[in-house]
Amino acid sequence: MPSVVALVVAAGRGERLSSERPKQYLPLGERMLLAHSLRRFTEHPGIDHVQVVIDPSDSALYEKAVQGFDLLPFVAGGETRQGSVRAGLEALTHFHPDIVLIHDAARPFVSSNLIDRVLDGLAHTAGCIPVVPITDTLKRLSARQEVTSGPDRNGLSAAQTPQGFRFASILNAHRTCGNDSLTDDAAVAETAGLPVAAVAGDPYNFKITSRDDMTRAEAMILPPMETR
Ligand code: CTP
Ligand code: MG
């Protein structure tokens, strides 16, 4: 069995949601949002360890959020998502797992089936990411919100997390990547020429970005998660 670590990035500030605290620490049902995102990984039989990357100024909230979870000690994040992932990967070098699953803390509805699909996909490739089809027509807007043109949605999909990689390959890609503002790890992998396969994502695994997303997440929590 390959050794697998889940790396959950939770060091963002949630500026687009603009709540009184970063979105990963907002209450969602009986726990904070972060606890939901972590649970599927800590409960998954194929995952050996879970490592969370946070902003150390949130450490009091973090300790409250993760009560009862068995986690590696947290790692301090960076200015960008990519910087936070890099910090998490560097902290894992002493473990040197075979596989790392990199997940956004802001996706609380990741399912264990989705984790299975990503892990299964990694049997044949260095990288594997979940994607969902784009069904709306895409438009590019000018600074004045005028519709200009739109890329053809054919052949386009939206990338989700967890994104799975062979640990040594993605660590090397992060170390050699010149750009520090890529918004997912598949884009980092691409800069190093790593092959990345796609598996079916899950529409429920949306990322909480705006206030509306939070409202939707709260509605989804109303029935206990176990009965969904
Ligand atoms: N993230 C991180 N470190 C950063 C920026 C983002 O660990 N410097 C994490 C976030 O905590 C989140 C994930 O990356 O779980 C996806 O980022 P995003 O949805 O953009 O979250 P925020 O950066 O917190 O939100 P915003 O961009 O609205 O400020
Ligand atoms: Mg962000």
Image (cartoon, grey):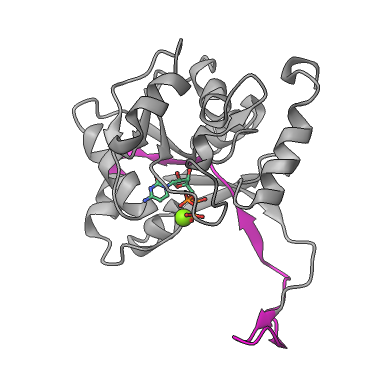
**Measured along the vertical axis of the image, is residue 113 above or below residue 202?**
above
The answer to whether residue 157 of the structure is visible from this angle is yes
Q: Give the range drawn in magenta.
A: 140-169
Q: Quadrant of residue 60?
A: top left
Residue for point 55% across, 57% down: 16
Q: Does the magenta stretch include residue 158?
A: yes
**Measured along the vertical axis of the image, is residue 204 above or below residue 62?**
below
The answer to whether residue 50 of the structure is visible from this angle is no
Q: How many labels does the image show?
A: 0
Residue 72 position, x and y percent, is 32, 20
Residue 143 position, x and y percent, is 59, 85
> Furthest residue to the front?
20
Q: Nearer the viewer, residue 3 or 13?
A: 13
Q: Which of 131 and 32 is in front in this view?
A: 32
Residue for point 72% across, 71% down: 153
**Measured along the vertical axis of the image, is residue 138 above or below residue 217?**
below
Quarter placement of the N terminus:
top left
Residue for point 67% across, 42% down: 214
In the picture provided, is 6 more to the left or to the right than 79?
right
Quarter placement of the C terminus:
top right
Residue for point 37% across, 61% down: 193
Q: Nearer the viewer, residue 95 or 124?
A: 95
Q: In which quarter of the image is residue 204?
A: top right
**Measured along the vertical axis of the image, is residue 101 above or below residue 175?**
above
> Furthest residue to the left?
94
Residue 33 position, x and y percent, is 57, 31
Residue 141 position, x and y percent, is 66, 82
In the picture provided, is 195 more to the left or to the right than 191?
right
